[in-house]
Image (cartoon, grey):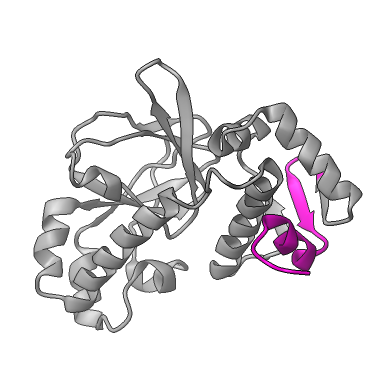
C-alpha cells in the first residue's frame, strides 16, 4: 500500500456529500483533526474483516469498495458497493463488531474517523450530530432497497438506476458508468445467478436501453431504464 497526502476536508471534492450543512470553518477544522487517511488500497485488498472489533468509521475518499458478509454456512453475500463520500461502519455501532468484510474493488482511499472521538465532537456540533443520525437512518433504508417482490429484471434495472443517481450526486456522469464490480458480484448482491444478470443485460441492450462494452456501460434511454425498475408508468 502507498501513502497519500494529508487529508483536508475543506478542499475535498466530496465535501458537499460528507459534511453536514451549516458547519463553520472552525468546526470543520476540529473535524479535520479527527480524520486520518488510509493508505492506497489496491484491488482485492481486505481492509476490514467481519467480526473485527469496531472502533472506526470510514468514508470513501476515492475509488470503490464492496462489503461482503459470510453467513453461518460459509457462503459469501455481497452486501453493497461503496462510492466516494459514502460512510462505512454505521451498522457496526450497535453490535460493536464489523458485520461484514470490506474489500477494495479498485485503487481506493478511505478517510478514517475514530467513532468515540466523533461522538464526543458531535455533541458540541449540532449539524454533525444530525448528519450522523441521518446517515444511520439512510443505512437502514439502503438495506431494504431491493424488495423480494421485485422481479429479476426490476432488481437489475433498479441497481443500475441507483448507481447512476449516486454517480450524478458525486458530479460524475449519470449515463456513463464504469462497473468496477464483476457480474458475479452484482448477481450475488441481487440474489440471482450470474447467467441471469448477463442474459438481462443483453436484453436491455437489445431494447436500446443500455450499451455495454466490457465494464463500460452507457445508459441510452434513462426513461426506459426507469420503466424497467417498475417504479414508473409508461
Was residue 23 drawn as part of the magenta stretch in this picture? no
**Farthest residue, direction top:** 73
User: Image point 10% across, 70% down: which residue?
Assistant: 123
- In the image, 227 versus 121, the foreground residue is 227
- Residue 208 lies in quadrant: bottom right
x then y, percent, for residue 113: 24, 53
Find residue 1 and report its horizontal and vertical position in percent.
42, 34
Query: What residue is at 61 percent from the left and 47 percent from the top?
Result: 150
Q: Using the rendered view, name the quadrant where residue 168 is placed.
A: bottom right
Q: Is residue 6 left or right of residue 106?
A: left
Q: Which residues are magenta?
A: 213-234
Q: Residue at x 60, y 56 (%)?
A: 163
Residue 84 drawn above or below residue 72? below
Q: Is residue 166 above or below residue 95?
A: below
User: Residue lying furthest front in this view?
Assistant: 149
Camera-side residue of 193 and 105: 193
Please give left or right for residue 72 compared with residue 193 in the image.
left
**Residue 58 placement (x, y as % from top left):** 32, 50
Q: Is residue 228 shown in magenta?
A: yes
Amino acid at each position: 500500500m502507498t501513502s497519500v497526502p494529508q487529508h483536508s476536508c475543506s478542499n475535498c471534492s466530496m465535501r458537499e456529500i460528507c459534511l453536514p450543512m451549516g458547519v463553520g470553518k472552525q468546526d470543520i477544522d476540529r473535524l479535520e483533526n479527527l480524520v486520518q487517511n488510509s493508505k492506497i488500497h489496491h484491488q482485492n485488498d481486505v481492509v476490514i474483516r467481519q467480526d473485527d472489533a469496531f472502533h472506526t468509521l470510514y468514508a470513501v475518499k476515492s475509488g470503490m469498495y464492496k462489503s461482503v458478509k459470510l453467513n453461518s454456512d460459509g457462503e459469501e453475500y455481497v452486501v453493497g458497493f461503496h462510492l466516494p463520500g459514502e460512510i462505512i461502519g454505521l451498522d457496526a455501532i450497535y453490535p460493536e463488531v464489523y458485520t461484514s468484510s470490506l474489500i477494495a474493488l479498485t485503487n481506493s482511499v478511505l478517510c478514517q474517523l475514530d467513532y468515540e472521538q466523533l461522538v464526543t465532537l458531535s455533541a458540541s456540533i449540532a449539524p454533525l450530530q444530525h448528519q450522523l443520525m441521518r446517515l444511520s437512518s439512510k443505512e437502514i433504508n439502503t438495506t431494504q432497497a431491493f424488495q423480494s417482490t421485485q422481479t429479476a429484471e426490476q432488481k437489475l434495472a433498479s441497481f443500475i438506476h441507483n448507481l447512476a443517481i449516486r454517480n450524478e450526486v458525486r458530479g460524475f456522469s449519470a449515463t456513463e458508468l464504469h462497473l468496477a464490480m464483476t457480474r458475479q458480484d452484482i448477481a450475488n448482491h441481487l440474489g440471482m445467478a450470474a447467467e441471469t444478470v448477463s442474459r438481462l443485460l443483453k436484453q436491455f441492450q437489445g431494447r436500446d436501453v443500455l450499451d455495454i462494452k466490457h465494464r463500460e456501460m452507457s445508459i441510452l434511454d434513462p426513461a426506459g431504464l426507469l420503466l424497467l425498475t417498475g417504479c414508473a408508468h409508461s
